[in-house]
Image: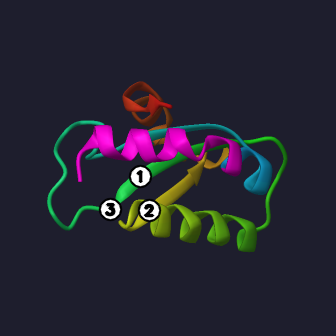
Amino acid sequence: MKLADLENIIKEHKNDLKQNFRVKDIGIFGSYARNEQKDNSDVDILVELDEPVSLLGLVRLENYLSDLLNIKADIIPKNDIRPELRDNILEETIYL
C-alpha cells in the first residue's frame, strides 16, 4: 500500500476517529512517511487525543486502524514519545 492510499483512508474516517476514539490530530511517520516501506512494513501513526485514554482504549484504536488500513498499525500518543526520539518523529510526521 502507498502513503497516498493510507492518507485517503484515514481522512475518510477522521470523524469516526474523533467521535469514537477522541483523536484530535493524526499523522503518519516512520518508513511510510520516508517512502522506505517494504511489503511487510507496519504503519507508524502518531495521535494527539482530546483526553487521556486507557491502555485498552489505545489497543482498540490500534485494532480499528489496523483493520481499516488492512495493515498492522502501531499507535503512539504524541504525549508518550520518548524524549530522545521526539524531534525526529515530529519532524517527519505527515499530518492528515
Q: Name the outermost residue toward the top.
A: 91
Disc 1 marks a residue whose amino acid type is Asp
Q: CA distance from mark 2 to mark 3?
A: 6 Å
Q: CA distance from mark 1 to mark 3?
A: 7 Å
Q: Is residue 66 above or below residue 28?
A: below
Position of 54 relative to 95 (above/below) = below
* Callout 1–callout 3 Cβ contact below 8 Å: yes
> Are dots 2 and 3 in contact, CB under 8 Å?
yes
Sooner in the amino-acid sequence: mark 2 or mark 3: 3
Residue 48 image-quadrant placement: top right
Q: Is 73 above or below relative to 33?
A: below
Residue drawn at x 56%, y 52% is: 76
Relative placement, left or right, of 43 versus 38 is right
Residue 19, given in percent of the width and then of the height, sits at: 79, 49
Residue at point 29%, 41% (across, down): 3
Residue closest to the far right: 51
- In the rendered image, residue 28, in percent from the top left (x then y), is placed at 42, 41
5 on left or right of 19: left
Give the residues in magenta.
1-16
Dominant secondary structure of the residues highlighted in magenta in the image: helix
Residue underneath mark 1 = 44
Mark seen at residue 42? 3
Image quadrant containing the N terminus: bottom left
